Amino acid sequence: MGVPFPRNPGQNSRLADEVRGARVGNAMLPFLMLWIGQAPVNPPDYKAVPLSGGFVRIETSEYTIEVPKSWQVTNSTRFGQREVIGSEGRMTAMTAPGAGRQGWDRLYRTSLYFIQRDTPGRPTPYKLTKTKQGYEAATFSLLDDDGFARERYVILRAADDDILALSIKIPGKKKESELLPVFDRLVSTATLR
């Protein structure tokens, strides 16, 4: 049933101090803030460098990408995933150190396993290409029921076999002409460190 909260200050004062004190209070602060509707604010784990034309360069310890200035960039998750969220679309960047040693077939199958857990669709075969920065890359898409490539993926592989997986979700055919140039810039400017 638990330990009852002490009724007078002298009774079991160590427990009372821990319940009232910083150790428990600080550990519970993020949960309390979420409960009352305020998310805790973490400083960005990246540097945003303003560029001309309404873009910013996002510099992280693993890679650099360019995204629209008006889009929100999240901190990286513990799995190396970062979201870039616009009013009409969503892009993702995810790193995997050394994963390129698997080979393209296995990288493709592993990617599809995780993608199709969350999103139904028909994958296209991957195509090997080179990016403007000289990285070997595999590109593929996930088609919806109408055959539209609603999600597009590019996996970059560096010489040391680290990979950077980039993707975009396009809400519909009408937004494709607006969002594809943004994704193309993300891919063409991406560099691994």
Image (cartoon, rainbow, N blue to C red):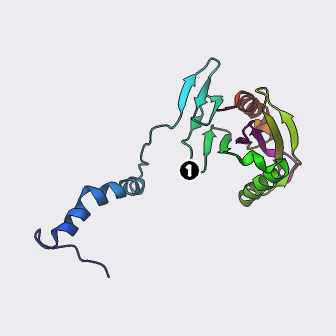
- Residue 44 picture location, percent across and down: 49, 37
Q: Tell me what residue is drawn at x 61 percent, y 43 percent.
A: 82
Q: Amino acid at mark 1?
A: Arg
Q: Quadrant of residue 5?
A: bottom left
In this image, 160 relative to 42: left or right?
A: right
Q: Is residue 145 magenta?
A: yes
Disc 1: CA contacts within 10 A as few (<14), some (14-19) or many (>=20)? few
What residue sits right under mark 1 in the picture?
A: 78
Is residue 44 shown above or below 2?
Answer: above
- Residue 74 picture location, percent across and down: 55, 41
Quadrant of the drawing holding the C terminus = top right
What is the magenta segment's predominant secondary structure? strand
Q: Quadrant of residue 140?
A: top right
Give the farthest residue toward the bottom: 1
Q: Is residue 70 magenta?
A: no
Element at badge 1? loop
In this image, 64 relative to 4: left or right?
A: right
- Residue 19 picture location, percent across and down: 25, 64
Q: Tell me what residue is drawn at x 87 percent, y 45 percent.
A: 126
Q: Quadrant of residue 55?
A: top right
Is residue 115 shown above or below 136?
Answer: below
Q: Give the total of numbered labels.
A: 1
Quadrant of the drawing holding the N terminus = bottom left
Please name whichever residue, 158 or 34, is drawn nearer the observer in this view of the structure: 158
Is residue 20 shown above or below 140?
Answer: below
- Residue 136 picture location, percent across and down: 81, 35
Please name whichever residue, 37 or 47, is drawn nearer the observer in this view of the structure: 47
Boundaries of the magenta span: 144-169
Please name whichever residue, 101 or 72, is drawn nearer the observer in this view of the structure: 101
